[in-house]
Image: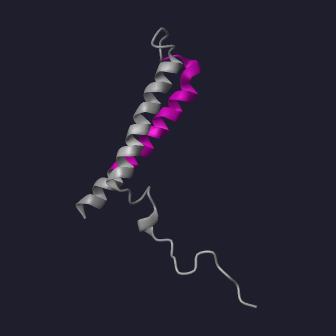
Amino acid sequence: MEQKTIFKNKKLTMEKNWFENPTKKQTIIFSAIMFVGIVLSILSITNFFSESPFNKKYLPSFFLIISTTIAATQIISNYLKRKNN
């Protein structure tokens, strides 16, 4: 009995991975979404800057913001490495 595969002649390569090899369009879209998300998060955390953002209860939100920034930085650096090669 022969097994059927869903992906008959397609191999998953590093070129298909948008995090390791992003295109210019993907880099711009992810950076814009990241920037808007961080701004909206800071605005909602601080009630439109009526409270100080440096409060201990906001620490989990800032870890999320920092991790998003690190991911965006990695995507941008991966794009620049790919562009220079």
| Extent of the magenta region | 54-76
Give the prevailing secondary structure in the magenta stretch: helix
> What is the quadrant of residue 19 in the picture?
bottom left
**With respect to residue 19, does 3 lie above or below?**
below
Residue 61 drawn at (x, y percent): 55, 28
> What is the quadrant of residue 28 in the picture?
top left
Q: Is residue 2 magenta?
A: no
- Residue lying at the far bottom of the rendered structure: 1
Residue at left offset 55%, top offset 25%: 59
Which residue is more in the foreground, 4 or 31?
4
Residue at left offset 47%, top offset 39%: 68
The N terminus lies in which quarter of the figure? bottom right
Colour approach in the figure: one colour
Residue 8 drawn at (x, y percent): 57, 80
Residue 59 appears left or right of 84? right
Residue 48 drawn at (x, y percent): 47, 14
